[in-house]
Each structure stands twice: as C-alpha cells, then as structure tokens.
RNA sequence: GGGCGAAUAGCUCAGCGGUUCAGAGCGCCUGCCUUACACGCAGGAUGUCGGGGGUUCGAAUCCCUCUUCGCCCACCA
C-alpha cells in the first residue's frame, strides 16, 4: 500500500436502520412459545359480553409435500392465508389455521430412488420393506424442513394440531373412506386403458398426465387387403401397429363400405386382422380408416370391445417392445421401435406419407416422461355420484370462487368428470386395504378397515393388494381428517366446516374439487365456503418459476436480504387478487426494496414518535368519559385531518380485507403512513413535538393513537415490524401482542369533511410555493416572502389557523395575506390554486417576467378550454336531463370554481403587465 | 376444436356494475446528507388507456370485431 495515498473518505455514519432478521426469528419463537396462534377458547374471544361469540374462522391450508422446499409459490400462498387469519384473529374470532405435510407418493419415492441410485441400486434391489424404511428415515430427517421454512414466513399456524397424511391417525381415516366407498360400489377394480409412466412405473390419473402440444408426424400406412389392394390408415404412433387387432371405418363411409368384413394382412407382424365398421370413427380425419390398437389407445380399446377383439399388449412396463412382437423389434424402446417400424415400412413401400402434425402428448407430472396409454388392472373411483352434489353446491352459491371465473373451470370439469384411477404401482403411500384369498375354491376379495390375517370366509391365506393409493386420495380428506374424523372429536365439531381455502389454480382438479366431493360425501358438509385462487409466480418471460428452469427465487434468500415483512409486502401489494405475480430473479432489488424501504420508513416514524414521547408520557384518550380526555376544541386543523384520514383508512382497509382485496388494504395503509402521517402530519407537528411546546400533549396523543391504529391495520401484512413497534408504544403491558390486539373500529366522530378539505388547501398552498422555489432555483436554505389572496373562506380559515405551519413547510419567512393580488411592486412568481387562491412570491431579479407571463398564459388557455368544454356540457340538455342530479351539480360547482380561478389569473396577468 | 385471461407511463401493475380515473411503485430528470429515515426529502417529465367499429349526454371503463401474448380443457387416430 502506498503510504502517501490519500486516505479514503470515511463512510458516512449510517443512522440506525431497521434490521429485520434477528428480530423476526426471535419474535416468531416467542409467538409460538406463548401459543398465540392457537385458536382462542370461546371465553377469551375479545367481544363485548352482550354480543354473541363469533364463529371460529378456519382456513384450510394446503399441506406442502414433505420433500418440498420453500419457493415463491408458498411465499405468495402462505402470506395471503396468514393475512386473512391474522385479520380475523384480531377481529376477535377463534382463528384456526392448521399446518400439515403430505407424504407425496411419487414425488417422495422419486427422491429416495435417486438417493439409492447413487449406489447403483434400484428399489427392486433393495426390496419393498427395506425401501419403505429408507423413505421413512428420509422423511424423518428432512420432513421438518419445510415446516421450519413456513415459520420463517411468519405464518401464524397452530402447530399444536400439526398432521401428516401418512400418520396412523390419518391412515385410519383413509381406510375408512376407501372401505366405505368400496362397500357402496363407489370404488371398483377393472381393466382399462390408463396413463402409464414408463419411468415411474405406475399408473397415473388423467390429471397427472399433463397434455402438451408437440410437433409430431402423421404417418399414412398402407395395409394390404387379403382380397387385393390396400387400405391406408393414419397414425401418430406407428410403432403401435405391431399391436393392431383390426382396422375400423365409419359405417356410413362410402369409400370403405365394401371393405367392411374384409381381412387385412398386418405388415411387419404378418397377422390377419379384420376391417370393422364403428360409428366412433371420424370420417374426416386422416384417411377415415383407423388402425385399432386396443391395448394402447382408449378409443381403440372401446371400439375393439364392441367388436369382440382381444387386446394385444406389445410393451413392457418400461415401454419397450415385449416378446409378442417379431423378434427384431423386441427390447426396443418405443421411440426406437417407431423409427425401426417407419424405416421398414418405407423400405416395403407401404409408407405413403409422413406429414408434420401437431398434437397433444401426455407427460408425467412428476418426471416429464411421455406417458403411454396402457391397458391394465387398476382401482377406480366412480365419480358421477360424488360430483353431482359438488356441482350443486357451486350452482346454488354455497361454494364460491374468488376470482369468480374459476367457478366455471370447476363446473366444467365436474360436468365432464371421468372416473378416477386411484391405484399406483408404488411402494410409498397408503396400501390399498384389499385382501385376496388365494385358495382356488374361495378367491374372495375383502376390503377391510383393519388388517386381515386369514380369509374370513375360508380361513385360507390372504394376499394384500400390492398397490398404494394416489396421494390425492388422502389429501382430499385433510379438511376433516386433520381434525380427527372419523371420530367425532371436539376439534371436528368446532372447526369443521372451514371458511376459506387459499391455493393456486393449478390444483383445482387435483385437490380442490376432490375435497369438495369427499367432504360432502363423508361429512355432509362443504369443507369450506370460499376458494381463493392466487396467481402464479412467474419470471419476466412469464414462465412459471421452477427449479428445473432455474428461474426461481429462493424466498429464504430474499428474507435474509430484505426481511420477511418486505417479502410479504411485495407478495400482497404486488398484484391484485388472483393475478399472476411477475418477479425478476435477476433484479431482486426492484421487487423487494419497496417493502424493505417501507419497513425502514415505519421504523423511523416509530423512532421519531417514541423519542419525543418522554419517559413519563402517558397517552391521553381521545374520546370517552375519561377526565383526561382530549376535547375536540384542543385539536388543530392538522390533528383533525390526520384523525379523519386515519379513520378513512380504517374503513378502507377493513372493507378491503373483507373482500379479499389484500393489495388494496396494503396500499391504503402504505399511503396513509407514508404520505399522510410521515410526509405531512409529522412535519406539521414537529415544533409541538420537540421540547415542551404548547399543544405538545395533544400532538403526542394524536400521533400515538393514529400510529397505533395504522400499525394494527398493517399487522396482517407485515407482522414483525408492526409487532416490534407496537409493543414500544405507551401503555403496553409486557405480555401484550399486536397479533391479539383488537382490529381498529371506524369511529363516526372522527369523520371531518371540513378538515379534509382545508388541509388539502394547506397542502396545495405549500406545494405551490415549493414548486415556485424549485422552478426558480431558490437555494433550499433561503427563506422567501409570499403573499396570498383568496376568495375562498376555507383558505382564509386555513391562513388564520395555520399560517405559521404553512410558512414553515414552504420555507417562507413571512406569509402575508392580502386582498390585493398585486400588492407587490416587485417581480413575483405566481400560482393559482384550484379554489382560486392566488399565491405571489416576490423573487426580484430571479423572476423572468416573460416566462411568468407565458406560464400564466398557458394556464389561462388550459382553463379556458376546460371552461368551454364545461359550458358545452352543462348546455347539453341531454346531459342535464339524464345524468344524475348529484353529477350535474358537481359539474356546475366545478365550472364556478374554474371561472373564479380564471378571473384571478386574468387579474394576475393584468397586474404583471403581460401582453394580451 | 372448445373455453378463459391479459394488452394502461421505460418496467411491474392498480383503476373496469359510465361522468374529479388518467394513477401507484420502480426507473428517469433537477435540487437537497433540512438532527426520524439518502432504504430519505422536495420539485419535475412521460401515456391518442393494443387497432377499428358501435351503444350513450358521456367509455380506459359496456357491446362487436381484429391483432398479439398467455393459460386451461378435449379419445380425432
């Protein structure tokens, strides 16, 4: 280091800033330790004794997968739920929000399979018992992670009631439902075409096979007829031809009528297969002739059944060609087989064309592998009977969606519902509670709530079904199983049915619809009355955030850098209800700094207020019969204004929360705290606040009260900083927590239209002078004089009561009131307020007369235009006749005010000697 | 093939059962470290509210249509 290098400038000492992380963790631990998030008992609900105890408020929380790690979707989702639950908790309701985890069959099994794959083994090498034990161990070790991460978000859930979908308690409930439905013939087993994932080696439900449009080809293949000539069939999956059992044409199709009943020599395989007629065939697609592969296509399966064809399964579970196909194809992967088949057909001259064709292809929702339609024995739930009541609940308005449009999506799915394949060829999950007797003479099947050791009919040995249930089978039950169902527990009686479910629209079918159906069927009641669908978190390219795309934002990272409150503020204020939230992973600053800045602003507002209260300060109540009450006459204009604005904000925020408009609530409180309280009120009262000034007590009482109210309004969105500051306000006992503080009530006595109007004038006056100063580059420290002339009584009143305040805020040494707009002989800069109040600031040489004239001229012209338009509007008979009276009179008042203003402007221009 | 949603300041979005609705935050420009806060304060610029029609006294706001994005559903091989 060079010895003579100038020493770097010492960094400016940073004033204390709000530092969230430490505070937040400690606060959460305390909240949880004290059990503040457990629903209050009826006795402790804070309501006046003469009102009935409100019903508990219950949010059904989507249980994250045990293997999940926190992502922004959770961040948005859980914050919304936490806002709602905290709001209702503060309103005095017993608020229950019960967390849990989902065992997540395929997802979890895949994770552990990957782990053992590291040592070169598959689950089959390890064996079922050992494998399940490994998964359990894994879940034991890492399953808590997501729950810890949820706490970091500040989610105020009731951890004393935590559940897990694979616990003994919930497993019992799952069996109860399965056996009940089995006995009522709502569950059946059968051989059908299902979606098969060749990688996960299991069946999937229709919802789990995600359709995506892909560019493929439509091959046209010649099938030689035995009688000579040939038929041309079209297919997107030529390899399946090896499993063809026939060709179908439409019965009315003239082109093929004479060929129905003929036989076709299936190329490559050499088998003879029939041509049949079936109405399910679309004459207009392809060639109008469809090859039938009943074991690998649902439509083909149906047609084949009608024509008594035996399906021919040509693939192994891994989707390789099995031994039923010619030897040279055996063992080939389905896509290799496709190439091989196409190549051979081409060589044989049987390939007519291979045109590009875009069509939907199903993919496994867990691993992305192309699913294979496959004929297999599976368990199904008969959905129609379950769907009818669920559809009725929506139609009759008992089930409501927010935003409403999702109701249509729900209804449409319900109307076209298909049976649900619930068996999975996995090892991780609820084993299907069905046993088969192996004795040839008996062979009975039993579904049982308890494990069976021997055949109840013949005493012979039993074999339990190998499959497990779809994870969503147990998930759909959690609204009531988490509360103890099928037992009639006190929790179930008190907290079921719930009120609201908050989740993403991507699981409406997987979960929401099925909860409604099973809830209605098992308990006779809807599990919740409202479904709030949040938006989806996306990147700037509008892609869904996901680990695989690498475009995700780690909420924990955001929290470490900006604080939980900042994350929550962004999630809530960032977008309206149900609209997607766009976040840029490469620019966290843009997304989260506003929340952090707001928290810091609050922190500093708090510091200013608290540091000026004094140790002995005790707030005087603002209303009521207390002897120390502050009388209305003691309040200044600005006091009355901020109290009125505070009350407006209470009404706005409360209404917004009630209507789920969380962003409106957050922005209303943000605006009040920052613009009204910090930018104006605090600046106004500073002189009264400092030291022992007159009116200091009143100012302290007002600011403390309004700040207290605003903190409570904001608490659902930003729980940590509001708690921290609220606790430091005067009058708090050590055990008080804002999370149990009463939600602010609007107070009619606070409404004060006069104060709102007059303070707005004060703001306009100050703003006008500030603008003039800025325009003419008056040095910040330099005080000017200003003269005000006004026709408005409100303005005169403001000048009477708050002249020194206005003068101070505008940095004016002497704010004079005059009846004469042209009192100053010197050059002045001028402004006219909307109510006609005119402001003149003598700036001597600084003022450019021509510029001033031009400015006024522009203003005059603008006004003149507006007045002309207004005159035309009011002269329009149609308008006067048809528009509401209130609108017409408002427009008249506007015209009067503008004319007044125009008069003042004209006068100004005359006095300044502007050319006309 | 159906259905839905979105198109408003450079960016992310509010406003949409019609008449102070053209807004917020970020960004940008100018000036300020004014003892709560530079994660700040004050002032300022920016938009024929996607295009075109229509209804109306009046439309970003309702209707129709077009364009561009995005999503969901669907057994047309």
Image (tube, coloured by chain):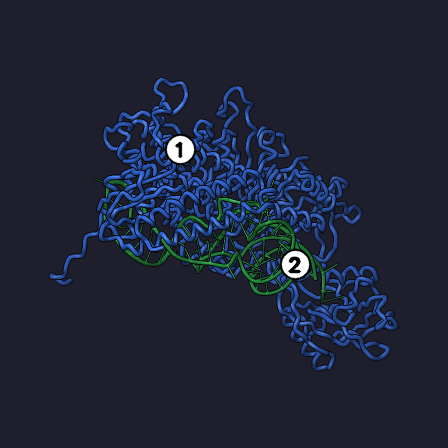
Question: What shade does chain A have?
Answer: blue
* In this view, A915 is above or below A276: above
Q: Which chain comes out green in the rendered image? A: B
Give the residue at mark 2.
A196
Side (left or right) of A27 relative to A97: left
For residue A330, what is the image quadrant?
bottom right
- Name the element at disc 2: strand
Do the CB atoms of the residues marked 2 and 1 lie less than 8 Å apart? no
Q: Are marks 2 and 1 on the same chain?
A: yes
Against A836, residue A852 (above or below) is: below
Q: Earlier in the sequence, mark 2 or mark 1?
A: 2
Q: Which mark identifies residue A755?
A: 1
Q: Chain of mark 2?
A: A
For mark 1, give the secondary structure.
Answer: helix
Kindly identify the residue that appears in the image at 53 percent across and 19 percent down: A50
Neighbour class for label 1 at 10 Å: few (<14), some, many (≥20)? many
Are there few (<14), some (14-19), or many (20+) residues within 10 Å of tag 2?
many
The spot of residue A544 in percent (x, y) is 52, 56
Q: Position of residue A752 (x, y in %)?
A: 43, 31
Q: Nearer the viewer, residue A802 or A83?
A: A802
């Amino acid at each position: 280091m060079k010895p003579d290098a100038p020493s770097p400038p010492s960094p400016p000492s940073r004033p204390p800033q709000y530092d969230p992380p430490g505070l937040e963790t400690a606060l959460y631990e305390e909240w949880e330790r004290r059990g503040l998030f457990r629903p209050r008992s009826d006795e402790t609900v804070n309501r006046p004794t003469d009102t009935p105890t409100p019903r508990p408020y219950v949010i059904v929380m989507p249980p994250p997968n045990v293997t999940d790690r926190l992502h922004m979707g959770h961040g948005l989702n859980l914050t919304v739920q936490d806002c709602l639950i905290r709001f209702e908790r503060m309103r005095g309701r017993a608020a229950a929000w019960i967390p849990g985890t989902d065992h997540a069959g395929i997802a979890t099994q895949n994770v552990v399979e990957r782990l053992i794959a590291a040592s070169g083994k598959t689950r089959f090498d390890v064996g079922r018992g050992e494998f399940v034990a490994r998964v359990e161990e894994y879940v034991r070790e890492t399953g808590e992670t997501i729950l810890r991460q949820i706490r970091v978000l500040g989610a105020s859930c009731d951890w004393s009631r935590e559940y897990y979908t694979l616990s003994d308690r919930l497993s019992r409930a799952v069996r109860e439902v399965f056996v009940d439905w089995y006995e009522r013939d709502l569950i059946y087993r059968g051989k059908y075409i299902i979606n098969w994932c060749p990688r996960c080696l299991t069946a999937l439900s229709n919802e789990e096979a995600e359709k995506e449009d892909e560019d493929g080809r439509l091959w046209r293949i010649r099938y030689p007829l035995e009688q000579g000539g040939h038929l041309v069939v079209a297919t997107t999956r030529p390899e399946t031809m090896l499993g063809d059992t026939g060709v179908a044409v439409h019965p009315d199709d003239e082109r093929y009528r004479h060929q129905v009943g003929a036989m076709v020599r299936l190329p490559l395989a050499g088998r003879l297969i029939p041509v049949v007629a079936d109405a399910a065939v679309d004459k207009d697609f392809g060639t109008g002739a469809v090859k039938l592969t009943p074991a690998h296509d649902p439509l083909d399966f149906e047609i084949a059944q009608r024509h008594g064809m035996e399906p021919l399964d040509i693939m192994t579970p891994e989707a390789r060609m099995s031994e039923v196909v010619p030897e040279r194809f055996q063992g080939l992967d389905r896509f290799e087989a496709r190439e091989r088949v196409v190549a051979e057909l081409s060589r044989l001259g049987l390939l007519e064309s291979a045109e590009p064709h875009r069509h939907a292809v199903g993919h496994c929702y867990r691993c992305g592998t192309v699913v294979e339609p496959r004929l297999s024995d599976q368990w199904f739930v008969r959905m129609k009977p379950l769907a009818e009541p669920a559809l009725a609940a929506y139609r009759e308005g008992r089930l409501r969606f927010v935003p409403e449009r999702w109701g249509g999506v729900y209804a449409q799915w319900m109307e076209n519902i298909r049976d649900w394949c619930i068996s999975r060829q996995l090892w991780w999950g609820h084993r299907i509670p069905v046993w088969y007797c192996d004795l040839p003479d008996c062979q009975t099947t039993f579904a049982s709530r308890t494990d069976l050791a021997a055949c109840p009919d013949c005493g012979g040995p039993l074999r339990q079904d190998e499959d497990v249930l779809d994870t969503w089978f147990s998930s759909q039950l959690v609204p009531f199983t988490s509360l103890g169902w099928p037992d009639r527990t006190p929790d179930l009686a008190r907290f079921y049915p719930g009120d609201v479910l908050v989740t993403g629209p991507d699981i409406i079918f997987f979960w929401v619809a099925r909860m409604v159906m099973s809830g209605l069927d098992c308990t006779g009641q809807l599990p919740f009355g409202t479904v709030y669908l949040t938006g989806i978190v996306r990147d700037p390219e509008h892609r869904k955030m996901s680990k695989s795309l690498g475009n995700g934002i780690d909420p924990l990272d955001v929290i470490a850098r900006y604080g939980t409150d900042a994350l929550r503020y962004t999630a809530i204020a960032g977008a309206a209800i149900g609209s997607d939230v766009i976040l840029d992973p490469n620019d966290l600053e843009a997304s989260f700094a506003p929340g952090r800045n707001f928290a810091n602003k609050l922190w500093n507002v708090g510091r200013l207020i608290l540091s000026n209260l004094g140790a002995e300060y005790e707030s005087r109540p603002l209303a009521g019969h207390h002897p120390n009450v502050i009388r209305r006459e003691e309040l200044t204009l600005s006091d009355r204004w901020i109290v009125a604005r505070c009350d407006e904000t209470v009404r706005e925020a409360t209404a917004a929360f009630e209507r789920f408009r969380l962003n409106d609530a957050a922005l209303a409180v943000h605006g009040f705290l920052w613009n009204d309280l910090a930018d104006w009120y605090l600046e106004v009262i500073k002189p009264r606040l400092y030291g022992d000034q007159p009116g200091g007590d009143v100012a302290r009482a007002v600011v403390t009260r309004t700040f207290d109210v605003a903190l409570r309004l904001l608490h659902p969105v930003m729980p940590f900083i509001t708690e921290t500051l609220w606790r430091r306000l005067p009058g708090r006992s050590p055990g008080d927590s804002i999370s149990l503080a009463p939600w602010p009530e609007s107070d009619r006595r606070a409404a004060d239209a006069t104060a709102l109007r007059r303070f707005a004038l004060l703001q306009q006056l100050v703003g006008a002078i500030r603008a003039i100063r800025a325009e003419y580059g008056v040095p910040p420290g330099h005080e000017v004089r200003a003269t005000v002339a006004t026709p408005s009584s409100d303005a005169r009143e403001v000048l009477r009561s708050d002249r020194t305040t206005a003068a101070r805020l505008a940095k004016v040494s002497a704010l004079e009131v005059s009846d004469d707009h042209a009192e100053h002989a010197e050059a002045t800069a001028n402004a006219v307020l909307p109510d006609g109040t005119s402001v003149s600031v003598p700036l001597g040489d600084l003022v450019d007369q021509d510029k001033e004239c031009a400015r006024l001229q522009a203003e005059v012209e603008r006004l003149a235009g507006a007045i002309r338009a207004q005159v035309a509007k009011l002269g329009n008979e149609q308008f006067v006749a048809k528009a509401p009276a209130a609108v017409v009179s408002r427009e008249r008042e506007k015209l009067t005010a503008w004319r007044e203003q125009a008069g003042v402007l004209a006068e100004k221009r005359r006095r300044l000697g502007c050319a006309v």
